[in-house]
Amino acid sequence: MAKQLNVGIIGYGFMGRTHSNAYRNVHSFFSDVPYEPVLKTICGLEEKEAKAFAERWGFKSHTTDWHKVMDDKSIDIVDICVPNNYHAEIAIAAAKAGKMIICEKPLARTGKEAEPMVQAVEKAGVANLVSFNYRRVPAITLAKKLIDEGRLGRIFHYRANFLQDWTISTKVPQGGMATWRLDVKAAGSGVTGDLLAHCIDTAMWQNGPIASVCAMTETFVKERMNVDTGKVEPVGIDDACTFFCRFKNGSLGNFESTRYARGHKALFTFEINGEHASIGWDLHDLHRLSYFDHRDDSQVRGWRSIHVTDGDMPYMGHWWVPGLQIGYGETFVHQLADFLDGVAKDKPASPTFREALATQYVCDAVLVSAKNGKWENVKA
Ligand SMILES: NC(=O)c1ccc[n+]([C@@H]2O[C@H](COP(=O)([O-])OP(=O)(O)OC[C@H]3O[C@@H](n4cnc5c(N)ncnc54)[C@H](O)[C@@H]3O)[C@@H](O)[C@H]2O)c1
């Protein structure tokens, strides 16, 4: 019999839905994980919406006060799906209450804000994970496996993009619940913390630590209406960011993110070039991995498009039959399965708060470099 674990999710927005879906499905698809999550409490700002969400997703209760989730002794896991400015306060309270914690990315707005979160979970000895879910796209997990097996040989280049186009209009406001990402007080930064954090986490997982960065950022729309104050105010986030970096292993990195690439909604891509082979991936075709191996017979040498659906591919044995693909939502199921498996085996799933702090430090260095126009070393 699987042990039941009560879950309290803070935030019923986009991520509240992906995480609720994962809790509902993880035990059905990953039956080897010896826990069965129970959706106990959903918390969000609006009473009516929280109640409706609870009814729709099958939560036993709802609240508009996250402190109540910490006070509820029956809750085992606190799952943080709120804007970035609330992560630290809620996570530290959850750690003090002895809860296991899953926190959405980025861990916090800055490294300085994230450090006490790391200390709190380590002092409390509670299981903790940051939701960098792209690691759990089967094709990305496969890419990591191929790199670890040494198939690429020495790595020379890592390049990644995350392109969107939803803030080009000057009429898009900042602040409020719909556009908190444009308000620096809530988000901490723009595309750097929101989008590049994903690229950086994936890159360091695959290719090791980033040692130094040289960045430029731009805020194309300098003023926007702030929904919270009703006034037109300066915009404090980076609309676009491009940075070069040196990885500790000697390879060179090239990262770009923007919300001003007309025609792109969520184009996360990466390419890795090694001595023997190269790998490429594209979120719009997320079940495929591109692979080129120079050691192939020259007559059939070329880029392969691997359809990552067979049962021996990462995670895929838990899903349908070979040839049938899965999507974005399932990455959160995989993340949860790994988290619960880590709890069962006392072997923490990655990235823990401490591991995610490294990504935060890269983001910090990128923003400092963009300001001072110089190369910045990343805090170790
Ligand atoms: N892993 C990913 O791919 C991914 C994707 C999107 C967002 N995120 C991250 O998830 C987090 C949430 O983003 P989202 O897109 O779900 O946001 P959202 O705007 O869709 O939802 C935010 C939720 O937070 C709730 N909330 C806000 N302040 C609160 C408070 N003080 N107390 C209780 N509830 C509060 C709101 O009611 C709302 O339900 C962010 O940190 C974001 O960076 C991660």
Image (spheres, rainbow, N blue to C red):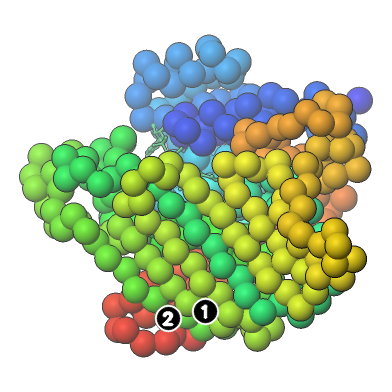
Q: Position of residue 26 (x, y in %)?
A: 75, 30
Tell which circle, 2 or 1, labels the residue nearer the N-terminal end: 2
**On residue 245, which mark appears?**
1
Return the residue nearer the eye: 95 or 31.
31
Quarter of the image that includes the N terminus: top right
Q: Which residue is mark 2?
A: 214
Residue 370, compared with residue 29, is above or below; it is below
Q: Residue at x 68, y 29 (%)?
A: 23
Apparent side of residue 65 relative to residue 342 in the rendered image (left or right):
left
Q: Position of residue 336 (x, y in %)?
A: 71, 40
Q: Residue at x 86, y 31 (%)?
A: 322
Q: Position of residue 233 (x, y in %)?
A: 12, 52
Return the residue nearer the eye: 197 or 4.
197
Marks 2,1: beta carbons within 8 A: yes
Measure the alpha-carbon separation of dots 2 and 1.
6 Å
* Image quarter of residue 264: top left
Apparent side of residue 308 relative to residue 229 in the rendered image (left or right):
right
Ligand 1 located in image quadrant: top left
